[in-house]
Amino acid sequence: MTATIRLQREPFDAATEVAAMTRGRTDIGAVVTFTGICRADENGAPIAALYLEHYPEMAEAEIARHVDAARARWPLLSVTVVHRYGRIKPGEDIVMVVTASSHREAAFAAAEFLMDYLKTCAPFWKQVERIGGKTGDKTDDKFWVEAKAADHSATERWSAS
Amino acid sequence: MKVRYFAWVRERVGKAEEEIDPPSGVATVGELITWLARRGEGYAYAFENPKVIRSAIDKKHVNSDARIERATEIAFFPPMTGG
């Protein structure tokens, strides 16, 4: 099983990551790709950008622990996780998980498992930059995204089963 | 030991990291939060609701009852919102 984990400021290309994973291999029968993209709104209000803060050393270690957990649970042949940090504009990719296995079930399940854990356990925090506030009040131009209970429940279900 | 703060905890405390030397009676992460909260206005604001604060010792998530005596780096931050 091969694993690639990268935290980077720069954009990534999903097709390139998948091609790099499968190049020269004939054991992989299924690849599942999830890409998380920055929307142009947060809670119904338009946004200028997201700013992702992270705890670099822990993020890498935490993602690696969950990749190991996924590998212990499903017969995976390869996993790639790329997570961006810094300023990300609407329409740009934020995160990507690619899982490969001989058959689709493991690849689908592991991709979902990894994304659920990334959202609630990987030390990243999103801050929203609003589009020019009417008041021009600078302190009102940015706010931290609040963690969602639904994300927490999504993660919980993996320990219940 | 080194303490690191992230996201709004960092903003409220007013710094990203610092070296601290808590008294020996401060044995757990929860006790450290209580001790930090008394260090000033920013700290009090950052740690006003200890239940929402997440903690890590040496880059691993821990609960508030985790012991800190062997910690090199302790981090405090809000619930994560990555992905």
Image (cartoon, coloured by chain):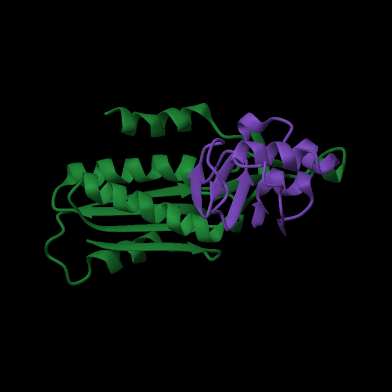
Chain colours: A green, B purple
Picture coordinates of residue A125 (x, y %)?
A: 59, 46
- Whether residue A89 is visible here, answered yes or no, is no
Residue at image position (29%, 68%) is A20
Asked if residue A95 lies left or right of residue A32, the reply is right
Q: Is residue A1 above or below residue B5?
A: below
Picture coordinates of residue A134 (x, y %)?
A: 84, 38
Taking the view exactly as shown, the residue that stands out farthest to the front is: B24
Picture quarter containing residue A47? top right
Residue at image position (71%, 47%) is B23
Quarter in which the N terminus of chain A is drawn: bottom left
Q: Nearer the viewer, residue A3 or B41?
A: B41
Picture quarter containing residue B9? top right
Total tally of numbered discs in the picture: 0
Picture quarter containing residue B36? top right
Asked if residue A120 lies left or right of residue A78, the reply is right
Q: Is residue A60 above or below residue B62?
A: below
Asked if residue B72 lies left or right of residue B47, the reply is left
- Whether residue A35 is visible here, answered yes or no, is yes
Q: Is residue A32 above or below residue B45?
A: below
Residue at image position (16%, 67%) is A25
Q: Nearer the viewer, residue B44 or A116?
A: B44
Picture coordinates of residue B67 (x, y %)?
A: 54, 43
Quarter in which the C terminus of chain A is drawn: top left
Q: Nearer the viewer, residue A148 or A65?
A: A65
Picture coordinates of residue A36 (x, y %)?
A: 46, 47
Taking the view exactly as shown, the residue that stands out farthest to the bottom is: A24
